[in-house]
Image (spheres, grey):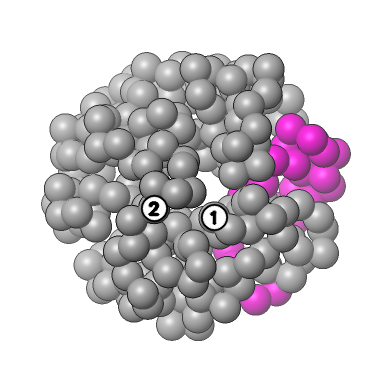
Amino acid sequence: MILYPAIDLKDGQAVRLLRGEMDAATVFNDDPAAQAEAFVAAGCEWLHLVDLNGAFAGAPVNAAPVEEILKRCNVPAQLGGGIRNMATIEGWLSKGLRRVILGTVAVENPALVREAARAFPGQVAVGIDARQGRVATKGWATETEVMVTDLARNFEDAGVAAIIYTDIDRDGAMQGPNIEATAALANAVSIPVIASGGVSSLSDLIGLRNCGAPLNGVISGRALYDGALDLSEALAVLV
């Protein structure tokens, strides 16, 4: 399993939200690229980036810090937030981003996901963020009636590289991931699933590793910043 350290970007800073609330943001680093370099120095092989402002705006907002991270770090990075048309997808991939994450458009314009996955094999992921099993869009501000598994199955034949599944109620809360729901999703589809939301300890990582589902990886943010999870130890657990 791959550990993806998360760098959530708001107003040019690296922050973490509590359960997706923009007004509940804690700033952890004024220099996101320096934070990324620290994660790379500790041994991470991927970076998970989120343009929080972009998710609400529907277009990239934190492009400058993302580009600086891509310039200064030599590991692949994936980015979500505000990526809702082919021009934006092409733009990011041309700047060295390894993978784009499509969330809101996966619900509102699934044809775009399919088109992008065909055009850029292995470089398009779907972000599924949910509360109580129902998908939320537009920076988690809009709740839909779409069920997580139904949305994931819709892309079984689309060629997407991965599904990033986030339980919003666990995100940033340091209460542990929703292992049962994550494993159920991973067992329901053939697309690689990356777990996100609430990972806060080595026991959480072990639980995901041993959940009985073929997870691709896990994303962790606040726990790494708070020191509740040591990156080197976490990487060793997931080998």
Element at badge 2?
A: strand
Task: Say whether residue 136 is visible.
Answer: yes
> In the figure, is residue 21 to the left or right of 57?
left
Marks 2/1: CA–CA distance: 10 Å
Return the x and y of residue 172 as percentages of the image width and height: 34, 42
The residue positioned 51% from the left and 68% from the top of the image is 11
Write down the quadrant of residue 114 in the picture: top right
The amino acid pointed to by label 2 is Ala
Q: Are marks 2 and 1 in contact (CB under 8 Å)?
A: yes
User: Residue at the location (55% across, 33% down)?
Assistant: 129
Residue 52 is labelled as 1
Is 59 placed left or right of 14 in the picture?
right
Q: Does 220 sit left or right of 60 as displayed?
A: left
Q: Is residue 23 magenta?
A: no
For mark 2, what is the residue? 25
Q: Quadrant of residue 208?
A: top left
Amino acid type at image mark 1:
Leu
* Front in this rendered view, residue 22 or 221: 22
- The x and y percentages for residue 168 are 45, 32
Give the x, y percent position of residue 189: 58, 23
Q: Is residue 237 left or right of residue 219?
A: left
Mark closer to the chain start, 2 or 1: 2
User: Which residue is at 67% across, 23% downward?
Assistant: 144
- Please report the residue visible at 60 percent of the width from the left and 37 percent of the height from the top: 141
Classify 216 as above or below 40: above
In terms of image quadrants, where is residue 143?
top right
* Extreme residue toward the front, this view: 23
- Examine the rendered structure and indicate whether residue 209 appears above or below residue 232: above
Residue range in magenta is: 94-121
Task: Give x and y (percent) for residue 133.
Answer: 53, 18
Q: Nearer the viewer, mark 2 or mark 1?
A: 2
Q: Is residue 61 above or below residue 180?
A: below
